[in-house]
Image (cartoon, helix red, strand yellow):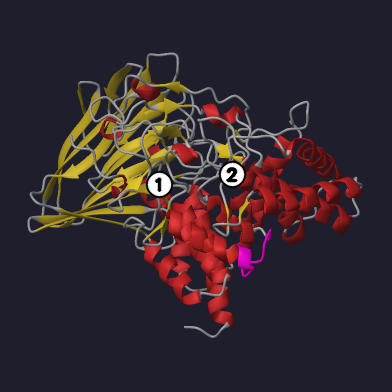
């Protein structure tokens, strides 16, 4: 089997996990029952041993189309041919504490024959399983240390073949076949036994998503695009814990055949902070509040010295030990395939600024923070005062050694600035004189050590010959005015160094910005949205809109974005990427507001 392009997938989910559904009707990736559980389907990472769940009509030369039922996360995959038209609807149900995939296949035109193959590979393909078929159900039971039992309930007869449940069936016009994959718990009755369950759960699921989208306060241009990004972020959010995974996948490469293959099924403080702000901008205060409570719990678990980890498990666990899966070949041979993430114990100073900024904004636009949270915030600000001069791995999690990065300094400034604002606004006790002194010292250092007078630009680190795309956040977090001459000349330097036809690289690869890894990567999608927003804030609305709308054209057919784009515009990295959709929402929100304020169409 040839590996399909990463952008040929849609997603379905239940806010506990997500499945990637290909345009050929195959679920080629799903961890189950939670985001960070071992995979049961991972054909996207190994075409032979990864496992899959495919429904396909026997049609020659069928064209494929995929779309969401508007304002929902219910996915339709359509097969069109002169010999007939078939359709699959896919969704995950939303009953609390239950995990269930519902797949309904229908013939729209003419009589069509279908084949269904459900071939799980438990525990990242490492564990064998038994298969038993009885009546309308197939039971898959893991034989390894990771105990999981899956039930496939079918409306058509099933047979067993080499560990897979298989069905071949024919449907006339308007006829349906239904397949329900669920966790099978001994002694627990499943509602899926009810004959009306497929249709009633379809309606309930679609109604839930429509009600949720209707809560958005965004009414501007690009409403459909923004709503799709919001729906994607909601799918990436844990309904149990309130946290959000950076992406639902692991191992998808930043370079085909390369080693930049990471596990993103965890919650980064940085991503979460930006997400919280994005949710509040759209009016989703309930979700923002749940995320803030998750943050508050992490702040109550600070290290003895008052420091914070850069990322956690969705349940808040601290250890995310990285290991490789040698049994999986990787997407198009991109190895190693990693699970866990060794960056969890890195020092990344920028997270303190991002967290403090989100807490400040939540206190301002959401709910007033508690005294107990403030006391931990105070510890974080004090820690920043003591450690801001340290070299670190920075926002991009380099593995080539620590440096004193510009962006880390800027966000340490932001941590102190937001701490000061909070203390003054709420009358919280704080050593303001010290905080103000350190904040001003950082400010002056940034304008001296990190300013290259010859180039007229803030550079990646002191003495660096190049800029860094993270500097695009400097005006966005109000460190510098978006029309300040120093910023405008920095923006021109970023365009010279990192912008390629409006697409933005994170940094230049090579000795100047060695990140400790072989190979290269694509343009970074969120950086392109930051760039568009910076142009808008600098007053160049026409160019900002051009770059923004041009970037929208690089989503996949469903409006989903990856982490990066390759040389031919192909999607790279784990998919879909929360960070990218957050950047889209932010840019759309600001650009729409400014266009309206100036009376632009």
Q: Earlier in the sequence, mark 1 or mark 2?
A: 1
Residue 482 covered by magenta stretch? yes
Where is residue 419 drawn, in percent x and y? 80, 50
User: Residue at left 47%, top 42%?
Assistant: 247
Q: Observer-nearest residue: 563 or 142?
A: 563
Q: Nearer the viewer, mark 1 or mark 2?
A: 2
- Label 1 residue SS: strand
User: Residue at left 34%, top 22%?
Assistant: 125
- Up/down of 34 relative to 68, above or below: above
| Outermost residue, front side | 454
Query: Is residue 423 something one can see in this rendering?
Result: yes
- Up/down of 129 relative to 224, above or below: above
| Outermost residue, bottom side | 599
Where is residue 359 drawn, in percent x and y? 73, 50
- Label 2 residue SS: loop
Query: Is residue 218 something one can see in this rendering?
Result: no
Q: Which mark is residue 12?
A: 1
**Residue range (magenta):** 478-486
Q: Is residue 184 left or right of residue 394?
A: left
Q: CA distance from mark 1 to mark 2?
A: 42 Å
- What main secondary structure does the magenta stretch of the protein show? loop
Where is residue 211 drawn, in percent x and y? 53, 61
Residue 358 covered by magenta stretch? no
User: Residue at left 72%, top 37%?
Assistant: 297
Q: Residues within 10 Å of mark 1 (few under 14, many from 20)?
A: many
Residue receiving disc 2 = 461
Identify the image quadrant of residue 309.
top right
Identify the image quadrant of residue 142.
top left
Q: Residues within 10 Å of mark 2 (few under 14, many from 20)?
A: many
Q: Which mark is residue 76?
A: none
Where is residue 589 drawn, in percent x and y? 55, 67
């Amino acid at each position: 089997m040839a590996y399909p392009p990463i952008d040929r997938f849609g997603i379905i989910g239940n806010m506990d996990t997500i499945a990637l559904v290909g345009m050929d009707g195959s679920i080629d990736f799903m961890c189950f029952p939670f985001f960070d559980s071992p995979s049961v389907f991972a054909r996207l990472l190994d075409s032979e041993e990864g496992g899959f769940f495919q429904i396909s009509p026997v049609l020659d030369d069928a064209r494929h189309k995929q779309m969401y039922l508007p304002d929902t996360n219910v996915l339709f995959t359509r097969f069109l041919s002169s010999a007939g038209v078939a359709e699959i609807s896919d969704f995950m149900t939303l009953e609390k504490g239950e995990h269930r995939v519902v797949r309904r296949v229908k013939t729209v035109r003419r009589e069509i024959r279908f084949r269904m193959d459900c071939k799980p590979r438990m525990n990242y393909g490492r564990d064998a399983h038994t298969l038993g078929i009885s009546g309308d159900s197939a039971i898959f039971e893991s034989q390894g240390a990771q105990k999981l039992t899956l039930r496939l309930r079918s409306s058509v007869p099933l047979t067993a073949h080499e560990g897979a449940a298989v069905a071949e069936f024919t449907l006339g016009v308007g006829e349906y076949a239904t397949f329900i994959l669920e966790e099978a718990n001994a002694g627990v009755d499943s509602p899926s036994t009810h004959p009306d369950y497929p249709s009633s759960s379809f309606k309930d699921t679609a109604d839930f998503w429509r009600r949720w989208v209707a809560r958005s306060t965004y009414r501007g241009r690009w409403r459909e695009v923004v709503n799709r990004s919001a729906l994607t972020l909601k799918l990436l959010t844990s309904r149990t814990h309130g946290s959000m995974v950076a992406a639902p996948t692991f191992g998808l490469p930043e370079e085909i055949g390369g080693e930049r293959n990471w596990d993103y099924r965890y919650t980064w403080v940085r991503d979460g902070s930006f997400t919280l702000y994005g949710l509040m901008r759209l009016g989703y205060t309930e979700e923002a509040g749940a995320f803030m409570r998750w943050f508050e719990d992490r702040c109550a678990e600070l290290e003895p010295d008052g420091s914070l980890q850069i990322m956690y498990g969705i349940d808040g666990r601290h250890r995310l030990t990285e290991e490789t899966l040698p049994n999986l070949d990787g997407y198009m041979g991109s190895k190693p395939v990693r699970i866990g993430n060794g960056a969890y114990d890195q020092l990344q100073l920028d997270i303190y600024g991002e967290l403090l900024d989100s807490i400040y904004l939540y206190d301002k636009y959401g709910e007033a923070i508690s005294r107990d949270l403030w006391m931990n915030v105070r510890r974080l600000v004090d820690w920043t005062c003591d450690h801001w001069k340290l070299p670190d791995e920075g926002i991009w999690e380099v593995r080539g050694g620590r440096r004193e990065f510009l962006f880390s300094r800027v966000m340490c400034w932001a941590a102190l600035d937001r701490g000061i604002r909070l203390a003054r606004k709420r009358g919280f006790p704080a050593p303001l004189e010290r905080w103000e002194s350190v904040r001003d010292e950082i400010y002056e250092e940034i304008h001296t050590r990190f300013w290259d007078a010859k180039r007229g630009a803030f550079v990646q680190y002191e003495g660096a010959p190049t800029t860094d795309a993270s500097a695009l956040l400097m005006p966005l977090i109000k460190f510098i005015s978006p029309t300040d001459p120093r910023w405008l000349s920095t923006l021109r330097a970023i365009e010279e160094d990192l912008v390629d036809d409006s697409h933005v690289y994170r940094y230049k690869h090579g000795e100047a910005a060695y990140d400790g890894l072989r190979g290269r990567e694509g343009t970074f999608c969120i950086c392109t949205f930051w760039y568009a927003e910076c142009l808008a804030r600098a007053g160049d609305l026409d160019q900002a809109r051009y770059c923004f709308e041009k970037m929208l054209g690089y989503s996949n057919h469903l409006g989903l974005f990856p982490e990066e784009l390759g040389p031919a515009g192909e999607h790279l990295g784990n998919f879909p990427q929360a960070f990218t959709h957050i950047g889209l929402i932010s840019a759309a929100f600001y650009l729409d507001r400014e266009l309206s304020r100036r009376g632009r169409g």
